[in-house]
Amino acid sequence: MSFDKCENVSTLMAKFNKTWFIAGGWAIDLFLGKETREHKDIEIAIFRKDQLNLKTYLKEWDFKKVIKSGFHNWENEFLELPIHEIHATNKLNEDKIEVLLNEEKDNNWEFRRDLRISSPMQL
């Protein structure tokens, strides 16, 4: 069992002063304490309001926004729903991460597909 990808992302994000968390399959495996399948990538999640902070923080990275399953350059515009997925590639070493934008309102996480579904955050 190796959580190297998770440790690398944790090191990468250590000085990011906004809330972030590991998402997707790795989040499940971390919760279980074991790797349940091979992972080809790693996803992190941030709150939508922090997206431009992330882009500034990862200044050595190229960013693509995903629109209808297509990859498009992400300049400096603020991404609104329905856009919720960003792919980032480190220009120096080709490391890659997928970033999922999460909704938040009044200290509640909101499900992007139905904003009526929410849960209080315990950060």
Image (cartoon, rainbow, N blue to C red):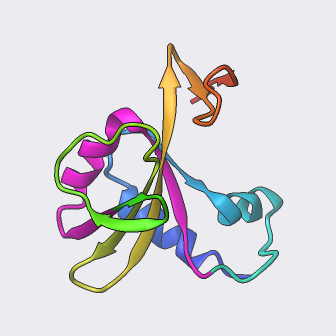
User: Does residue 58 sit above or below 120 in this rendering?
Assistant: below
Q: Is residue 59 left or right of residue 87?
A: left
Q: Is residue 33 left or right of residue 74?
A: right
Left or right of 32, for residue 10: left
Name the residue rendered at 65%, 29% in the picture: 114
Q: Quadrant of residue 78?
A: top left
Q: Is residue 110 left or right of residue 75?
A: right
Whether residue 88 is situated above or below residue 21 in the rendered picture = below
Q: Residue at point 40% right, 75% down?
A: 96
Outermost residue toward the front in this view: 68
Q: Nearer the viewer, residue 84 or 7?
A: 84
Q: Foreground: 15 or 112?
A: 112
> In this picture, is 36 found above or below 110?
below
Q: Residue at x 24, y 70 (%)?
A: 62
Q: Is residue 44 magenta?
A: yes
- Given residues 23 and 113, the one toward you in this image is 113
Image x and y of residue 27, in percent = 68, 58
Q: In which image quadrant can residue 81 be found?
A: top left
The residues colored magenta run: 40-64
Q: In what quadrant of the picture does the C terminus appear?
A: top right
Q: Percent x, y for residue 45?
A: 50, 49
